[in-house]
Amino acid sequence: MKKSTRKIPKRRAITTEDLFQLKLLNSVSLSPDETKIAFTLEHMDKKENKYFSNIYLFDLVQKETRQFTFGNHNDGEAVWSPDGKQIAFVSTRDKKTAIYVMPITGGAEKKLKEFDGSIANLNWTPDGTRLVFCLRYNDSHFIKDEKKKKEAPVYRHITRLFYRLDGFGYIPQDKFQIYSLDIKNTQLKKLTSGNKDNIGATISPDGKWIAYVSNHSKNPDIDMLRDDLFVIPLKGGKEKIIPTPAGPIAQPKFSPDGKTIAYIGHDNPNDAWGVTNMHLWKVGVNGHPKARDLMPKFDRMTFDQSISDVGDVHDISPFYWSTDSKRLFFLSSDTGATNLYYVPASGGKPTRIFNKKCHIKGFSLNGKTKTVAFIYSDLNNPGDIMTCPPQYHGEKKAVKHTNLNRFLQQKVQLGKTKEVFFKSFDGTKVQGWLLLPPKFNPRKKYPSILEIHGGPRVQYAHTFFHEMQYLAAKGYVVFYTNPRGGSGRGETWAEAIAKGWGELDYRDCMAAADYLEKQKYINPKKMGVTGGSYGGYMTNWIIGHTNRFRAAVTQRSVVDLKSFFGSSDIGYALNREFDGYPWNNKENYEKCSPITYFQKVKTPVLIIHSEKDLRCNIEQGEQMFAMLKVLKKTVEMVRFPDEPHGLSRHGRPDRRIARLEWIEKWFKKYLK
């Protein structure tokens, strides 16, 4: 038998430039007849140095994909008309936000209305004649002089506590209100008013009512977890409150039979930062039967909490009703995976319908709910479209429909990732992933990097991480773990660090370092540590408490909780996490602040911070740099202009690349 003479293509290591090749799924939407899937695909344009997204359609019958919208724009999630003949979407064409509709047969899109503001919760009315959505106008909308619109104001008069938001900037004076837009004559009608934000608009199946969420407490900025559920006639009129327990409310949806409204929430308005499980609740449209948790014994959240750097941070994931109103479908993150579940509408134990070590980033149900379409990602795949039946063991009949990042399998040699569980100091099992360099040689001694996630209430997961693969390609063993205080392991796990950051989480990180050191291929004298946000906090904490790491890179970090309280866009909510405010629990704020221990630092540290970071303000990095410099420690700082907190996930492409190169440069200097 002749040997094959076909040459196997030589695969290369992943690079920073590969960011420009990645095609990233942002949303998925199933048509009413369940034969087509609309999805948004994002890419980075190297020439323009920007992100662009367009809508595509996949035909489940013809097994074909075609591009639906074109051009260097940012087209939002596709919303199918009730008859499945049109798609509505929000786009930033012409550098202005507008709502468009387009027939699925193709052709020119129709611009319905242009807005100087932000749009959310786009819905079709059941008769297909109108769109309902939430809209908040920018301050510039109220300025008639076009020249002055583009200028910075003479001053900003601040009266509310929550006046800015990272990645957005200063919050407009206008509030989110609910509007309807007539498709034919493009007439806009305002349905709600007042000085409170009205969000989460959803329409009843008979087209007569709109349900929405609004915080009507005396001070919503302080009592941010005290939402109320309202309904209002679609034609406009007086709002009516539906009684619910005090607590957060998100994603309200009418049941198809119109009898109840389900939502994601809990009944603990004094919750720390994301400890109490958000569950699916159900309440009668008239308040009877009373609101109740459908899954009180389910010790997980009902949305995606997995993080990656090939997609922005997720909001609370949408859920869906079955067409017979008997089941509700949702996402949940559990021990490093995010999978699909359903729960009976009568309540009970949730059933996992897709059970794999993966990260489902979004999903969609429609029509008779015989098919679920979803975005599937795993350790080697940033995301593809899949479908499966919405039933137990659905993964056995799952079908993959796209291969969007084929180059990763054909041209790139990724490092191999191994999931591990190791014991912490008290015997608690902690989850982690060991990522080995391509062409790994077990007889060699490798430098290593311990990565710590932000949050803290998120999780590393079975999902693709470009940064981890890049560092592995540069010759490092990368170890990333889920210490206590994060998500995916229940309320007790998440609450373990409340009121005491830097204790159990630190000891779990040290247990990770111990485990890493014991691997025969690890050089214990060449270990580095890095993390961003809360991961930056932990990096700062670690170098103030141990010298075992040869180098550190701290990113968008927290150093002083007292100043963070006032300089962060959400810092004023620290009281729920640290058992009080800086003035009535000074000792705990000081004890838990890494800056308290900076005199002990001996590890060379690189500080990376963005100048427009409103979550962890750059003053945090500046304090650290100044103090360590005065103390004559080895420290350098890299600042990124015009970037917010999420530089690593959605920053300007050239700055994302520069960030990765600086991290590798620092570790190369001290670990190689």
Image (cartoon, helix red, strand yellow):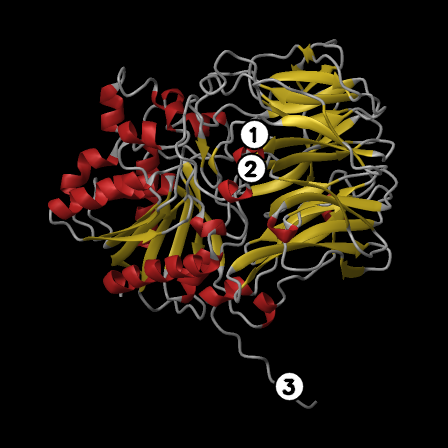
Q: Tag 2 or tag 1, which sits nearer the N-term?
A: 1
Q: Where is residue 472 drawn, in percent x and y?
A: 41, 62
Q: Residues within 10 Å of mark 3 (few under 14, many from 20)?
A: few
Mark 2 near mark 3, Cβ–Cβ under 8 Å?
A: no
Q: Nearer the viewer, residue 299 or 230?
A: 230
> Do the residues bearing badges 1 and 2 touch, measured as CB atoms within 8 Å?
yes
Q: Quadrant of residue 323?
A: top right
The residue under label 2 is: 334
Residue appearing at x 26%, y 32% in the figure: 593
Q: In this view, does 177 lie to the left or right of 525?
A: right
Secondary structure under tag 2 reads strand
Q: In which quarter of the image is the C terminus?
A: bottom left
Q: Where is residue 653 in the image (x, y as percent from the top left)?
A: 47, 59
Residue 78: where, in percent of width, then height? 73, 45
Residue sitting at x 74%, y 9%: 288
Which label is found at residue 6?
3
Secondary element at image label 1: loop
Say if residue 269 shows up in the picture: yes
The residue lying at 38 percent from left, 24 percent from top is: 572
On the picture, is 515 further left or further right than 320?
Answer: left
Three-letter amino acid code at the position of disc 2? Asp
Query: Secondary structure under badge 3?
Result: loop
Disc nearer the start of the sequence (2/3): 3
What whole-number distance in Å separates the C-alpha atoms at marks 2 and 3? 44 Å
What is the number of the mark on residue 240?
none
User: What is the x, y in percent for residue 621?
Assistant: 28, 43
Specify whether residue 331 is in view.
no
